[in-house]
Amino acid sequence: MGKKSVRYITIIAATLSVLWLLSLGWAIQDYYAGATDHVVKKQDRSQKTVIKNHMFTVVALGDSLTRGTGDDSGKGYVGYVADDLNERFNGSIVVQNLGINGQVSSQLKKQVKQPNIQRQLAEADIILLTIGANDLFQQGRTLENFDLATIKTIEDAFVKNITTIFTDIRKANPDATIFFVGLYNPFIDVDETGVTSPTVRDWNRIAEEVSSTYPRIVFVPTYDIFQLSVNDYLFTDKFHPNQEGYRLMADRIAPLIKWEGESK
């Protein structure tokens, strides 16, 4: 073999060695880059988990009671519950108040089916719910034309609606505790016939029975809070609670709420 052939073979071998080393370097770089990306992504997921674990999300649904109508501060029972939780949980509270003034159960049934509402419900740790007062009282018309057959029809429709509502909430979030707030009777002092009190009590009984068939639903009674001194706890419209009335409702709800992140 001539000197030129040896020289060519040496050059080719050296070139192949360099290419092999470059390929190895690229492979190692890609490997560690991928590993780093995996670690970063894992850290991002961990960070999100940490953030979620340190926040407590409250989603409130329902009618004007959820909105806090009648409370001069604008907080309502939802706001006072949040105040209590913020103090106990070191400010780690997020509240989404989705209540709508005047809402009835048929409207809430449609609301909870909306994709954006479903997403918010899925993030909830607890769900606060007031619904039914507008169904039953109908802005006072129930008192003006009180009829047991009409009440029964309204009641049956409400049961169907609330059953669908609970089912859809549970589809979005099977774990969050739902605090379903019962009705009080704002008409005790003006109802000379005495028909509204047994009607409200019967309504609450049925609502509690429906809620008891679902997991992690707590029915919270409020009838007794307003029973003896209703005018002391009502707003000037004689229907919605005033600030003190809402505080009493919150005082009943807040102690029922627990969280693993609560400081001891």
Image (cartoon, grey):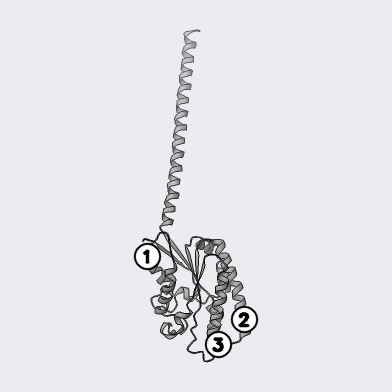
Residue 21 coordinates in the image, percent (x, y): 45, 26
Q: In this figure, which residue is indicated by the disc labeled 2? A: 152
Q: In this figure, which residue is indicated by the disc labeled 1? A: 88
Under circle 2, the secondary element is helix
Q: From where the camera sits, is residue 137 visible?
A: no
Please report whichever mark, 1 or 2, sits nearer to the chain's N-terminal start.
Answer: 1
Please report whichever mark, 1 or 3, sits nearer to the chain's N-terminal start.
Answer: 1
Q: CA distance from mark 1 to mark 2?
A: 43 Å
Q: CA distance from mark 3 to mark 2?
A: 14 Å
Of the residues shown, which amino acid type is indicated by label 3? Answer: Val
Relative to residue 111, is residue 148 depicted above or below? below
Of the residues shown, which amino acid type is indicated by label 2? Answer: Lys
Quarter-of-image position of residue 109: bottom right
Mark on residue 195?
Answer: 3
Residue 156 coordinates in the image, percent (x, y): 62, 77
Quarter-of-image position of residue 106: bottom right
How packed mark 2 is, by other alpha carbons closer than 10 Å (few <14, some 14-19, many 20 or more), is: some
Residue 143 coordinates in the image, percent (x, y): 55, 87
Under circle 3, the secondary element is loop
Of the residues shown, which amino acid type is indicated by label 1? Answer: Arg
Q: Is residue 158 left or right of residue 67?
A: right
Under circle 1, the secondary element is helix
Quarter-of-image position of residue 244: bottom left
Pointers 1 and 3 in contact (CB under 8 A)? no
| Residue at image coords 44%, 68% | 256
| Residue at image coords 43%, 73% | 252
Q: Which corner quadrant holds the C terminus?
A: bottom left
